[in-house]
């Protein structure tokens, strides 16, 4: 075997997850996973923690939540999709929330995928997760008529002095 001195192996820089070149042999601090980073709460994200708390309360009560989302619409909205229950047959079930009208149970879809039946579940725009869970459990015991949505709003998204924002953001703490 030839043991002549020759060019020494030079490690090459590596490209990190952040796309930058990092010198060889140095440990790089990894960023925290996205779920543990503290994000600023904006007007259009303030309802996310509330919807998460509702989804968790429903799950704790044995109601099967398929998925949930908080949408940055004006007014702010959210959707929680549920597994079918006997009172509603095989119809798709969901809970729709908006900051003006509160919670509505929706079920059944037409050919375009739009829900065909609606029933109001809350007496205000922001019931506690436990209050909403109780309303959903009651709706699952007795099928609601599919036309009980009121046309009016409990509040408007532009209302600034009704205490809504403080109650909504209390779920982020």
Image: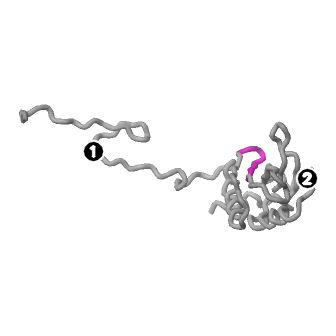
Quadrant position of residue 140: bottom right
Secondary structure at badge 1 equals loop
Q: CA distance from mark 2 to mark 1?
A: 65 Å
Residue that carries the numbered disc 2 in the rendered image: 146
Mark 2, Cα crowd under 10 Å, few <14 / some 14-19 / many 20+, is: some
Specify whether residue 129 is in view: yes
Whichever of labels 2 and 1 marks the residue nearer the N terminus, that label is 1
Q: Residue at x 74, y 52 (%)?
A: 81
Quadrant position of residue 2: top left
Circle nearer the viewer, 2 or 1: 2
Residue that carries the numbered disc 1 in the rendered image: 25
Image coordinates for residue 55, horizontal then vertical, percent: 70, 59
Q: Is residue 79 magenta?
A: yes
Specify whether residue 97 is in view: no
Q: Is residue 133 magenta?
A: no
Relative height, residue 155 to residue 71 (above, below): below
Q: Residue at x 77, y 61 (%)?
A: 163
Q: Residue at x 62, y 63 (%)?
A: 173
Q: What is the span of residues highlighted in magenta in the rendered image?
A: 72-80
Image coordinates for residue 146, horizontal then vertical, percent: 91, 53
Image coordinates for residue 77, horizontal then vertical, percent: 76, 49
Please state, as top left, top right, bottom left or bottom right, where the N terminus lies in the image: top left
């Amino acid at each position: 075997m030839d043991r002549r001195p020759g060019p020494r192996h030079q490690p090459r820089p590596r490209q990190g997850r952040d796309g930058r070149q990092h010198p060889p042999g140095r440990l790089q601090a990894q960023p925290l996973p996205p779920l543990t980073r503290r994000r600023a709460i904006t007007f259009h994200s303030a309802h996310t923690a509330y919807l998460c708390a509702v989804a968790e309360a429903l799950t704790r009560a044995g109601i099967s939540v398929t998925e949930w989302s908080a949408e940055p619409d004006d007014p702010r909205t959210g959707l929680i999709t549920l597994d079918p229950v006997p009172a509603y047959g095989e119809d798709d079930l969901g809970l729709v929330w908006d900051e003006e009208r509160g919670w509505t149970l929706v079920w059944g879809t037409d050919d375009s995928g739009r829900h065909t039946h609606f029933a109001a579940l809350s007496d205000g725009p922001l019931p506690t997760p436990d209050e909403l869970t109780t309303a959903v459990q009651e709706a699952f015991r007795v099928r609601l008529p599919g036309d009980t949505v009121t046309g009016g709003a409990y509040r408007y998204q532009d209302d600034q002095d009704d205490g809504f924002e403080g109650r909504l953001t209390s779920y982020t703490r």
